[in-house]
Amino acid sequence: MPWYLFCPTGFPADTSNPTFYQLPQSVPPNCPGQKNYLCAIQANDNSGAPIITAPIILEIANAVNNRTESTNVKLRQFYNC
């Protein structure tokens, strides 16, 4: 599955909105610093956008709330890209 960098354009930063993710990459992006905010997800592709499923939304929520990355979720220090 490809990786998608999360780059919201405003608030609220809806992690379930595929338009807030950049084009897919074959490797995980660099997400430096403390693990405070969503950086990237690994998901199936739908014409260049991630397919956001209930399990990935739950994985994102758990990662952000616990500030711990998971198999499909990477976190970063700052909110912006």
Image (spheres, rainbow, N blue to C red):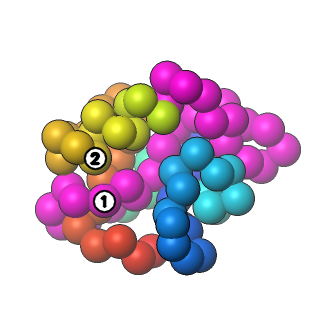
- Residues packed near mark 1 inside 10 Å, few (<14), some (14 to 19) or many (20 plus): many
Q: Quadrant of the N terminus?
A: top right
Answer whether residue 27 is visible to the viewer in this image: no
Q: Position of residue 61 (x, y in %)?
A: 35, 39
Looking at the rendering, which quadrant does residue 76 occupy? bottom left
Image position of 67 with respect to 20: above or below: above
Q: Nearer the viewer, residue 3 or 76?
A: 76
Q: Determine whether label 1 and label 2 are within 8 Å by CB.
A: yes
Which kind of residue does numbered mark 1 sit on?
Tyr
- Residues packed near mark 2 inside 10 Å, few (<14), some (14 to 19) or many (20 plus): many
Which kind of residue does numbered mark 2 sit on?
Val
Mark number, residue 64: 2
**Which residue is located at x 79 percent, y 38 percent?**
46
Q: Nearer the viewer, residue 2 or 66?
A: 66
In terms of secondary structure, where does tag 2 sit?
helix
Image position of 10 with respect to 43: above or below: below
Q: Nearer the viewer, residue 47 or 28?
A: 47
- According to the picture, the residue beneath numbered tag 1 turns out to be 37
- Which residue lies most toward the front here? 12
What residue range appears in magenta?
A: 31-56
